Amino acid sequence: MSENYQEMWASLGLNLEAHQGLLSVLSDAYQSIYLSQKNRPAGMGYFDFVVSEVHGLRIVELLKDKAAGKLIVGTFCVYVPEELILALDGVSIGLCAGADVGTEEAEKFIPRNTCALIKGFMGFKLAGLCPYVESADLIIGETTCDGKKKAYEIFDEITRKVYVMELPNKKSDEGRALWTNEIRKLAQKLIEVTGREITLDKLREAARVVNAKRRALQRLSEARASDPAPISGLDALLINQISFYDDPLRFTSKLNELCDELDERVKHGTGVSPKGATRVLVSGSPMALPNWKLHSIIESSGGIVVGEEACVGERNFRDLLDAFSTVDEALRKMADRSMGINCACFTPNDERLTDIHNMSSKLHAQGVIHYALQFCTPYLVEAYRAKNSVEAAGLPFLRIETDYSLEDAGQLKTRVEAFIEMIRDVKRS
Ligand code: BJ8
């Protein structure tokens, strides 16, 4: 942190001592996982800075926005349309959920066998460690998995800020109609809370901003198809994580600058790993900031992660919001766009298997690692069909079930190394 933010954190009610401890652990982890990487693109300097200020300068900006009358909206799911929040002069931010903190506190409210992401957001709040949740005026939840939807009831008792959208379980006509109506209801809620109107111009501007961000993330994804990969999977994951926190205009401009640099690297055959390094697609549960565990294990074992079939990844940016000519059409198009996100909370969810195949082929992946957080039933169960489908297409598949702790890191590394070695053997034969 370049400045002293103690006063700001105290005014937000953070637990200063515990927060300081968290920042120093994160800074050490960042140093050893990120800053030790070789041959990183120069453009990563901006994203390093954002991480170093993620609880500092970014919070200062949010509090300024709030003082200027903007609504700060916390979200947990890519089904919540960012454009709608922006169109009502809101700021959309992801909430802290990617680290093992406040677990003891969280387990007083929710069962021990709850996924790390849910325990993470409960724990961050209960331990006084998340300046985002404290800055937020409204938190939008969704009825996705059982763990999240039940935890939101308690989270609302604790924060008094939660609004829950009802997400259907099936992508049927009825499901689509329900979700379209939920988006209309969210629009009403935001109008009510902000006292503003939704206009076509504001919606168009918001769509332009968010689509530009998605296009920049698509460029990043496309660059990763090259061999040698011009950027590590770790860095690409970090950028995707930051896309939920940073100011969207600034983020897009900095990411496009980085992508220009990546294009040059591709032209000159410059990579972060040797040409021919084993290429892995990761698919499964989202990896919220600062969950870098699996990527770090894969890339320190000689592999390179070339894509994430995940919500912190391709599902967040693959589809743009189509053009619209009325406010209601914009809301319908938002619903249509998000119904193309193939989350394991839906049944059936065959489209996700197609997504895994398409990404594997587009990014020239040589193996798929399926990642599910422990107790994340939707992804854990879906791993069975993903495995059969990936193996039937002739690609090796490895199923990982883990949480945020580093206790199993050694065991996971042994399994990942063996997987990468197996892919190399297949390549050699
Ligand atoms: S669209 S993946 S962001 S719900 S909380 S399902 S890890 S048990 S997050 Fe998600 Fe939206 Fe779907 Fe994407 Fe499992 Fe944990 Fe549930 Fe989770």
Image (cartoon, helix red, strand yellow):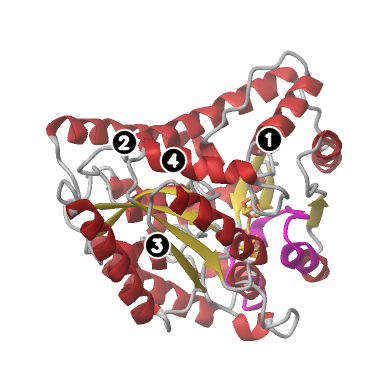
For badge 3, the amino acid type reads Glu
Q: What crowding class fits label 3: few (fewer than 14 Cα within 10 Å), some (14-19), or many (20 or more)? A: few
Pair 2/3: label in front: 2
Q: Which residues are drawn in magenta?
A: 125-151
Residue corresponding to mark 3: 3
The reply to whether residue 245 is in sight is yes
For badge 2, the amino acid type reads Ala
Picture mark count: 4
**Circle 2 SS class:** helix
Do the numbered discs 2 and 1 sit on residues whose CB atoms are within 8 Å? no
**Circle 4 SS class:** helix
Residues under labels 2 and 4: Cα distance? Answer: 13 Å
Outermost residue toward the top? 325
Residues under labels 4 and 3: Cα distance? Answer: 42 Å
* Chain-order first, disc 2 or disc 3: 3
Residue at figure coordinates x 50%, y 33% from the top left: 214
Q: Is residue 375 left or right of residue 284?
A: right
State the image coordinates of residue 306 (x, y, percent, origin top left): 34, 47
Q: Is residue 131 left or right of residue 151?
A: left
Residue corresponding to mark 4: 359
* Chain-order first, disc 2 or disc 1: 1
Q: 345 or 350: nearer the eye? A: 350
Residues under labels 4 and 1: Cα distance? Answer: 35 Å
Q: Quadrant of the N terminus?
A: bottom left
Q: What crowding class fits label 4: few (fewer than 14 Cα within 10 Å), some (14-19), or many (20 or more)? A: many
Q: 165 or 129: nearer the eye? A: 165
For badge 1, the amino acid type reads Asp
State the image coordinates of residue 101 (x, y, percent, origin top left): 55, 77
For badge 4, the amino acid type reads Met
* Chain-order first, disc 4 or disc 3: 3
